Amino acid sequence: MLSFFEELKQRNASLYFFGCCCFVAAVLCAIMLFVNSKQVLGINSFIKPLKFFLSSGIYVWTMGWLMYHLGEEKKIMICGVALLIKIALLLIHL
């Protein structure tokens, strides 16, 4: 399993670290589920960011793995920047 992460980091380091940041943020949101009791429409307000960070991390790592075969670095960066903007907008709403 360790070789997977090493290979992913070698294929695209920026998306690897961005995915790691997403998973760290997901862990923080999971902790906040128990610390914060704020609810929106009857559910904890950190459920949506938790799911979003998990799915974003999986998406970014998948893109980092697959785009290696396509070799289109500009498109990879555009996807990463667009996702970063989405995450920033989501965090503003918390």
Image: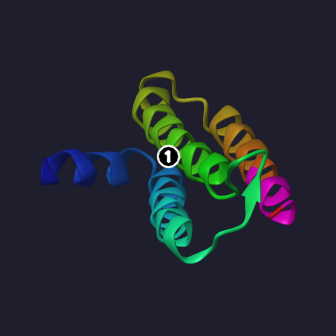
- 60 shown above or below 30: above
| Residue 58 place in picture, x, y as percent | 45, 39
| Residue 46 place in picture, x, y as percent | 64, 58
- 47 shown above or below 79: below
The stretch of residues the image draws in magenta is 87-93
Q: Is residue 91 left or right of residue 9?
A: right
Q: Residue at x 55, y 77 (%)?
A: 35
Q: Residue at x 60, y 30 (%)?
A: 72
- How many numbered tags mark residues here? 1
Work out which quarter of the rendered image holds the C terminus and state it.
bottom right
In the image, what residue type sits under mark 1? Leu
- 24 shown above or below 15: below
Residue on which disc 1 sits: 54
In what element is the residue under mark 1? helix
Query: 14 or 41, which is in the foreground?
Result: 41
Query: 74 or 6, which is in the foreground?
Result: 6
Q: Is residue 94 left or right of residue 32?
A: right
Magenta: main secondary structure equals helix
Q: Quadrant of residue 20?
A: bottom left
Q: Is residue 36 magenta?
A: no
Residue that lies at the very extreme toward the front in this rendered image: 42
